[in-house]
Image (cartoon, rainbow, N blue to C red):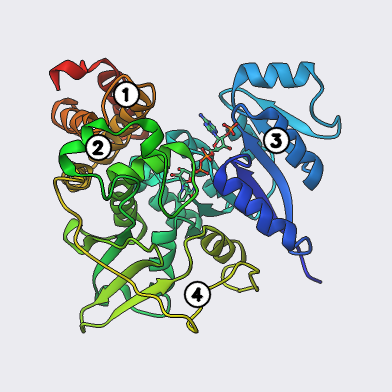
Amino acid sequence: MHKAKRIILLGATGSIGSNTLEIIQRFPEDFQIVGISAHTNSQALAQIANTFQVPSIALSDESTYQSAIQAELFSKNSQVYGGDHALDQLIQETQADMVVVAIVGARALSPTLKAIQKGFDIALANKELLVLGGSFVTQAVQKNKVRLLPIDSEHNAIFQCLHGNNSKDLKSIILTASGGACRDTPIDQLHTITPEQAKQHPNWSMGAKITIDSATMANKGLELIEARWLFDLQPHQLKVTLHPESIVHSFVHWIDGSVLAQLSPPSMTFAIQHCLFYPDKRTNPKPSLDFDTSFSLNFAPPEPKRYPCLQLAYQALEQEPYGGAIYNAANEIAVQRFIEKAIRFTDIPKIIQHALKHIQVPDTLSLESLLQIDQDTRDYALQIDPKKL
Ligand SMILES: NC(=O)c1ccc[n+]([C@@H]2O[C@H](COP(=O)([O-])OP(=O)(O)OC[C@H]3O[C@@H](n4cnc5c(N)ncnc54)[C@H](OP(=O)(O)O)[C@@H]3O)[C@@H](O)[C@H]2O)c1
C-alpha cells in the first residue's frame, strides 16, 4: 500500500515554506504534514494548520506563543509548543520521515541535529546551518545514515550533476550567481544603495535577508562554504561565475574536461519538488525551459571590487573551523544594521572583514565553543562604529 511521506516543515510561513506547501497541496496522497513552525506569524501558521490538519505546531517566539494560546488560535486537537525550545520539542515529540528546514538563521542548527539523530531525512534550504556547524551536521548525517538533500538551487544542481558519477573525478564546481540587485550599479555608487533598492532582486522572489545577501554576494560566499561541507571539497575546487539569467543553477567540472550543468527557470519549486520526491520524479505545472524559442545564456567572472564578500568567504574557509561561523554571524548582524539604516551597503563586507580579523577563537572545536564564537561575533559586529570602518 502507498504510504504518505510524513513531513515536518520548519519555517512554514516563509518563502520556501509557502513553495513547499504549494507542492504538497498538489500531491495529497504522497505527503502528510505532521509538524509546522513559524516565529511570529501566528495567524498564517494557524491557517496552514487548519488547511493541512497539522497535529503538531511550534511558535518559536515566546510572546507570540502566549498571545496565540490566549486567543485560542489553534485547534484543541493540536499540540502547540512555544518559545526558545519549541522547535527542538516539535522534533523530539513528532514521528516523521523528512524535515524541511526552511527557517532563516543559525537557529536551525539544534532542531536539525535532533532530527538527524532521530533518523529523519533532511531537505535543507537554510544556508547558515552548514556554514556554522558543517562538521557536526555532516558527521551526524553519516553516523545516522540519513539523507541530506540540498534545496538551495545551486547545491541541488550539483547534487543532481554528481548523480551516477564518481566524486573523486571531480575537478571543481562552479556556482552560478545572478549578481543581485546592484549588479549594474556603478561601483563608486554602491555606498548609496538603500535597503529598499538592495531588496529588489532581478530574477528571484525571496525573503529580505537572502535578497540583500544576493546583492552583496555574501549569499554566494555562504554557498561556497555550504558546498565545501555538502560535497567534501577543498577551497580551490570552489568557483563562482556570474550568470544574469539564473537558468543554469551550477556546473560540475570533471578531470577529463567535461562539464555538467543543471538548468531550469528561476523558481525554487523545481529544487524543492526534487527533494520532496527524491529519488522519484513527478510532473510540475510550472513552465519549464522552452527550446522552441531562442534564448541566450551569459557567463562572466564576478568583479572583486563589486563583491568583496565573495573573497572574504575564501578567507573564512582558510580560517576553519571557526571562519564560517564568524562570516555568517558578522554578515547577519551587518545586514540587520543595514536594514535599520545604521550602516551603509558598503559597510557590510567591512564588518565581516573586521570580525574575521579580530574574533579570538579557541584551539579545539566543540558545539559549545562554536555557539560561543557565533555569539561573540554578533556582539562584536553590533558594536562596531561605522565611522571607524
Ligand atoms: N527564498 C529562497 O528562494 C531561498 C533559496 C535558497 C535558500 N534559502 C534559504 O532558506 C532559508 C529560508 O529562506 P526564506 O527566504 O524562506 O525566508 P523567509 O521568507 O524570511 O522565512 C523565514 C521562515 O523562518 C521563520 N523564522 C524567522 N525567524 C526565526 C527564528 N528566529 N526562529 C525560528 N524561525 C524563524 C519565519 O517565521 P515568521 O514568518 O513567523 O517570521 C519563516 O517561517 C534561509 O536560510 C535562506 O537563506 C532561501
Q: Amino acid at mark 4?
A: Leu
Mark 4 nearby-residue class (10 Å; few <14, some 14–19, many ≥20): few
Q: Amino acid at mark 1?
A: Arg
Based on the displayed image, in which of its 4 quarters is residue 237 positioned? bottom left
Observer-side mark, 4 or 1, equals 4
Q: In whole angstroms, how far apart are the C-alphas of marks 4 and 1? A: 42 Å
Q: Amino acid at mark 3?
A: Leu
On the image, numbered disc 3 is attached to which residue? Answer: 45
Q: Are marks 3 and 2 in contact (CB under 8 Å)?
A: no
Mark 3 nearby-residue class (10 Å; few <14, some 14–19, many ≥20): many
Q: Percent from the top left, x then y, of residue 51? A: 80, 45
On the image, numbered disc 1 is attached to which residue? Answer: 378
Q: Identify the disc placed on residue 289.
A: 4
Q: Earlier in the sequence, mark 4 or mark 1?
A: 4
Q: Residue at x 68, y 21 (%)?
A: 65
Mark 1 nearby-residue class (10 Å; few <14, some 14–19, many ≥20): many
Q: Identify the disc placed on residue 322.
A: 2
Q: Residue furthest right?
A: 76
Q: Earlier in the sequence, mark 3 or mark 2?
A: 3
Q: Earlier in the sequence, mark 3 or mark 4?
A: 3
- Determine whether 323 is above or below 301 in the image: above
Based on the displayed image, in which of its 4 quarters is residue 87 positioned? top right
Q: Identify the disc placed on residue 329.
A: none
Observer-side mark, 3 or 1, equals 3
Q: Residue at x 86, y 34 (%)?
A: 77
Tell me: 20 left or right of 107: right
Tell me: 198 left or right of 97: left
Residue 118 in view, yes or no: no
Q: Secondary structure at mark 4?
A: loop
